[in-house]
Amino acid sequence: MKKLLLLAVLITLTVPTGAEYAAGDHELFFMPTAYTMPKGSSYFSDYEVLILNYTYAVTSRTHIGVFSFFPMNKEVLETAAIGIKQNYYSSEQTSCALWAAVIPKNKIFNLGNVVSLGKKGKSLHIAASAVYVANEDETFDSAGDFKAHRWSFTYTIGYRKDLSEKTSLIAEYSYISAEDDADFLCVGPRFRTKKIAWDIAAARPLIHDDPELIVFPILKATITF
């Protein structure tokens, strides 16, 4: 039984997902999809120049990456996160993946799961994740009660519709359940070539609506290697 379990894990880690990968398929604007790159591939993403992400496909189902703010100073480098995404199920119409990330310096841990339904060109994505914050410097809350950690949860739903071979329309909604609940909606196009994807989105919160805010822009570029 133990040998069969190890074999099943090995197959899950290494068997190709089967679908052809194109630049940007691994995520929408912010949320990950369940799709992964072929073994040995990698991508570099840049959000608004400020946020950087490099990820490498260890296997055709496993991504390992580093995520950080632009290195303006040494303190920013302390916020670097290490992440992994593992596709554990893939069929013609359904893919599922787990992801985990950690910011060692700040003791922040993230664990999530995403399900991608349909073919990539017309797909629905549903994800849920939990963030655990352990902070030894803030062991008491404002009421004086012991509080050595905090939890928050994020629920996201996204949709992608390919309008042509090089253009997609993407919509993504996220709800964050924490001490102060928040949400935001992002809508916009993706333009891509074989190796590069450009995402341009208009985003705004819905729960805490600011009547003076129309939208704020999101620009992301992704290049694959």
Image: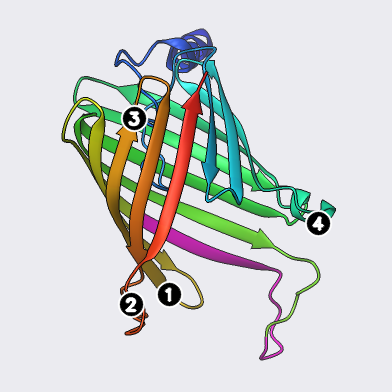
Cα distance, mark 1 to mark 3? 34 Å
Q: Residue at x 72, y 55 (%)?
A: 107
Cα distance, mark 3 to mark 2? 32 Å
Residue at image mark 4: 75
Closer to the N terminus: mark 3 or mark 2?
A: 3
* SS at badge 2: loop
Residue at image mark 1: 181
Which amino acid type is shown beneath numbered disc 2?
Answer: Ile
Estimate how packed mark 4 is, as few (under 14), some (14 to 19) or many (20 or more) residues with alpha carbons within 10 Å.
Answer: few
Instruction: Specify whether 151 is left or right of 175.
Output: right
Cα distance, mark 2 to mark 4? 32 Å
Cα distance, mark 3 to mark 4? 34 Å
Task: Judge by depth and name the residue closer to the eye, 81 or 110.
Answer: 81
Q: Where, by quadrant of the figure, is residue 67 drawn?
A: top right
Judged by depth in the image, the label closer to the viewer, 2 or 1, is 2
* SS at badge 3: strand
Q: Which residues are magenta?
A: 142-155
Cα distance, mark 4 to mark 1? 28 Å
x%, y% of residue 128? 39, 51
Q: Are marks 3 and 4 in contact (CB under 8 Å)?
A: no
Residue at image mark 2: 207
x%, y% of residue 224? 49, 23
Judged by depth in the image, the label closer to the viewer, 1 or 3, is 3
Q: Where, by quadrant of the figure, is residue 132 drawn?
A: bottom right
Closer to the N terminus: mark 2 or mark 1?
A: 1
Question: Which dot marks residue 72?
Answer: none
Task: Give the answer, above or below, for where 19 lies relative to 87.
Answer: above
Which amino acid type is shown beneath numbered disc 3?
Answer: Arg
Judged by depth in the image, the label closer to the viewer, 3 or 2, is 3
Q: Residue at x 28, y 50 (%)?
A: 188
